[in-house]
Image (cartoon, rainbow, N blue to C red):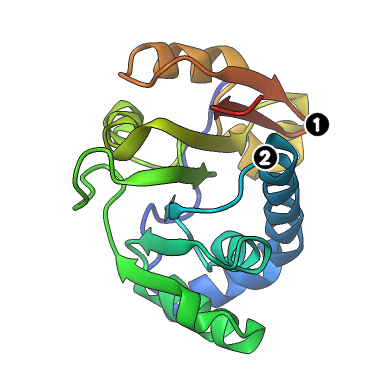
Amino acid sequence: MKQSELFHPRVFSDQEWAEGYYQRNKTNITRVAFRLADVLTKSGFKGGKIVDAGCGFGVIPIELAKRFPESEITAIDLGEPLLDLARDLALQSGVHDRITFQTGDVEKMEFKDDSFDLVINTFMLHVVEDPVAMLNEIERITKQEGKILISDLRRIWLGIVVKKLKTSFTLGEARDIIESSNLRPGKPATGPFWWDYFIGIN
């Protein structure tokens, strides 16, 4: 099945569109947040400096703030309406003082090398203009012994009826992109509609 063009903007600058995106996706993203937090807990992760590169409406960093309260969490996105939603949700969840939400480009992040103990990147690989550049940036800002959790949608036959799946990469295409980047070796895995690439997870 051929990959389709994105049907939504790469950067969510429209408030109404961003709010609709949140309503349509909040349940699934919340499940992802729980799943990634569970993976980290089982791996023995206790906390540290964390960045969510492409945080959207902030559900994942909010869950990490709850699970790892001693962590210093930064979350970046280019979509200002999404960041506004994220700040509101963090306030409602009581963790607004533990997360810094800021405007940031995942393909050119304004962080020093080896800055973070954990980098999270979800549902971004098929959205950005240059996925290799994004992966190189993720590698650059992660500490040598740090952890990286990348997850994205997987293009499968169900894309015939679920159009967002048709815009994503197949597992093979995602692996080719990862191998073209500077990203350190990790463990690929798949779920029903997604693929993962985890680094530093036992």
Q: Can residue 5 be seen here?
A: yes
Q: Nearer the viewer, residue 46 or 136?
A: 46
Where residue 192 is drawn, which disc sits there? Answer: 1
Numbered mark located on residue 44 in the image: 2
Q: Position of residue 181 (x, y in %)?
A: 32, 18
**Amino acid under disc 1:** Pro
* Quadrant assignment for the N terminus: top right
Q: Does the residue at mark 2 contact the one at mark 1 (Cβ under 8 Å)? A: no
Q: Would residue 65 be found to the left or right of residue 105 on screen?
A: right
Front-lying residue, 25 or 58: 58
Q: Who's the residue at 51% across and 20% down the image?
A: 174
In the picture, residue 92 is in which quadrant? bottom right
Q: In which quarter of the image is residue 39?
A: top right
For the question of whether residue 16 can be seen, the reply is no
Q: Which residue is depicted at the point 54% across and 44% down?
A: 123
Residue at figure coordinates x 75%, y 39% from the top left: 42
Q: Where is residue 98 in the image (x, y as percent from the top left)?
A: 48, 75
Badge 2 crowding class, 10 Å Cα cut-off, few under 14, some 14 to 19, many 20 or more, is few
- Say what amino acid the circle numbered 2 marks: Gly
Q: In the displayed structure, would residue 33 be above or below residue 166?
A: below
Numbered tag placed on residue 175 in the rendering: none
Mark sitting earlier along the chain (2/1): 2
Separation of disc 2 and disc 1 at Cα? 26 Å
Q: Is residue 153 left or right of residue 9?
A: right
Task: Give the SS element for disc 2.
Answer: loop
Q: Residue at x 65, y 28 (%)?
A: 195
